[in-house]
Structures are given as C-alpha cells and as structure tokens.
Amino acid sequence: MRQKVLLDGCVNCKACEMACSLHHVSRFSYQYSSIAVELMDGGVGISFRDPFTCDTCEGEGSFQCVKYCYRAKDALKAFIESQGASKVR
C-alpha cells in the first residue's frame, strides 16, 4: 500500500471505497476499490492500493469517491489531486 495521509473530517464510513468499486466493477466490494480508508494514529487515513488502479473515474464527470463522501469531500479531493491524478476535476 502507498503512503497513508490523514483525512480531516472522515468518519470511516467507507462510502468512498464503495463508490470507487462500483465505478470499477459495477458492484460494492472493498477489494476492487482503488483507495483504502483505515484508522490510524490521530484519525482516519487514506491511501491508494497497490497496484495503482485509479483512473480518476474516467467517463463519470467527477471523482465518485468525492461525490459520495459524507464528511471529508475537500480533504478527499485534495488527496486525489495531490497524488498525481491525471484529470483534476
């Protein structure tokens, strides 16, 4: 797994992971999500899974993880953009 960063405001609901897996394989399953959200010292952290499969939700019009995030939209979007996402929305 890649470097994990704290997500300010995240409550670990994992809606972002479910939205990501739905985009990739049309079903809800953590194993198909490009991102991983986990508890860490000081709060909740996020990282991209290895191998790197994030396609910035090509064809969707927006990052699906951000769209369905309940509490940490700004922090999540900043994370996706800071990691070199090819299409910043």
Image: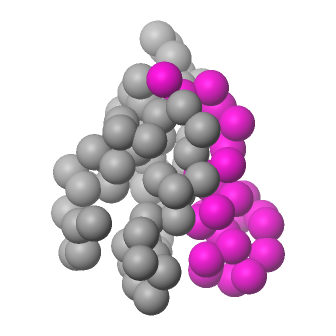
Q: Is residue 14 visible?
A: yes
Q: Residue at x 67, y 44 (%)?
A: 14
Q: Residue at x 47, y 53 (%)?
A: 66
Q: Residue at x 34, y 49 (%)?
A: 77
Q: Is residue 50 visible?
A: no
User: Toward the viewer: 32 or 27?
Assistant: 27
- x then y, percent, for residue 68: 60, 53
Vertical comparison of 53 with 67: above or below:
below
- x then y, percent, for residue 84: 20, 63
- Looking at the image, residue 72 sits to the left or right of residue 82; the answer is right
- Looking at the image, residue 55 sits to the left or right of residue 18; the answer is left
- x then y, percent, for residue 86: 22, 75
Scheme of colours in the image: one colour
Most extreme residue toward the top is 42
Most extreme residue toward the bottom is 59
**Residue 13 lies in the magenta stretch:** yes
Vertical comparison of 67 with 3: above or below:
below
User: Toward the viewer: 81 or 83?
Assistant: 81
Residue 17 sits in quarter: bottom right
**Residue 78 lies in the magenta stretch:** no
| The C terminus - image quarter | bottom left
Vertical comparison of 61 with 78: above or below:
below
**Start and end of the magenta stretch?**
9-33
Residue 52 sits in quarter: bottom left
Q: Residue at x 36, y 36 (%)?
A: 75
